[in-house]
Amino acid sequence: MQIDEIKRKIKGDLGKDILFYETTDSTNTIALNIAETNKEGLVILADSQEKGRGRLGRLWISPPGVNIYMSVVLKPDVKPGDATLITLMTAVACAIALRKITGLDIRIKWPNDLVVADKKLGGILTELKIYREKIAFAVVGIGINVNIDTKVFPDEVREIATSIKNETGRRYSRENIIAEILCQLHVWYSAFKRMDKETILSAWRLLTSTLGREVVVTAGKETYQGFAEAVDEEGRLLLRLPTGEVKKISSGDLGTPG
Ligand code: BTN
């Protein structure tokens, strides 16, 4: 990975400092450990991860040489309740960056999966440290399947996941994509710091593939089927159940009925 090339291409404040590891357990773990004593905007990058973490305690497949594993340290002066908006704005920034570079119809699947034709291309894991009811720092972890050949995925993963190379038939520069994501993140994080919730939510709504259709959501032990009506200011999915009741769901796994 050419770190200097990334730095040359970055326009905003995020990614001025980059720490690169050939391999590590998880870039989020490193970022969580060192965020306190470092400035906002620090980026941790790895070529591979031994214990890449996904949402809901899952493993994030992280082989070397092909994908993006990156964590960004943010220190916004906001309450923990606004943390979901950090993830939403990150998903918007990533989707816009990836659409610009690849031309693919990349969409956001609630809550924060990056998908193309309903197959997962990337994900975001935000982890927080709270101090005195404020966010001391947030670590935004971004994983993107770039040049991985999806033939190496286990069968059950291949059915639901894809990569940019798999969708376009060509390889892309990871440095270019990382720089574009950091430029977009700078723009959308500025909107977040202004608490311009409506701008972020409208962009998210334009980019999502989730709203306006029947979905099935598994949240913990419960499963709900209904019409995905909206996403509120806290990033909760508003699901209209067959009874007419609207259920507000904070996190879960989304699928299609049948
Ligand atoms: C998801 O489950 O959709 C979220 C996946 C997040 C993976 C990224 S890769 C970089 C960072 N480090 C980790 O251990 N996880 C995140």
Image (cartoon, helix red, strand yellow):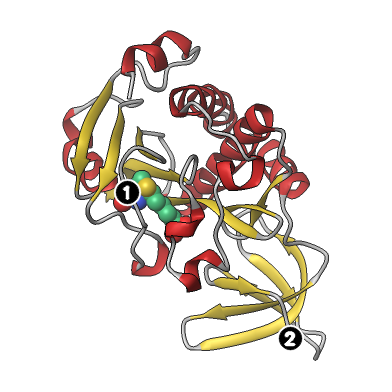
Quarter that holds the N terminus: top left
- Tag 2 secondary structure: loop
Q: Which residue type carries mark 2?
A: Gly
Residue 19 percent coordinates (x, y): 24, 26
Q: Please, is residue 242 above or below residue 103 in the view?
A: below
* Residue carrying label 2: 258
**Of the residues tagged 2 and 1, which is closer to the observer?**
1
Quarter that holds the C terminus: bottom right
Return the residue found at the far bottom.
Answer: 243
- Using the rendered view, name the quadrant where residue 195 is placed: top right
Identify the mark at residue 63; answer none if there is no mark. Answer: 1
Q: Residue at x 64, y 46 (%)?
A: 167
Q: Residue at x 30, y 54 (%)?
A: 52
Residue 125 percent coordinates (x, y): 41, 52
Q: Which residue type carries mark 1?
A: Pro
- Tag 1 secondary structure: loop
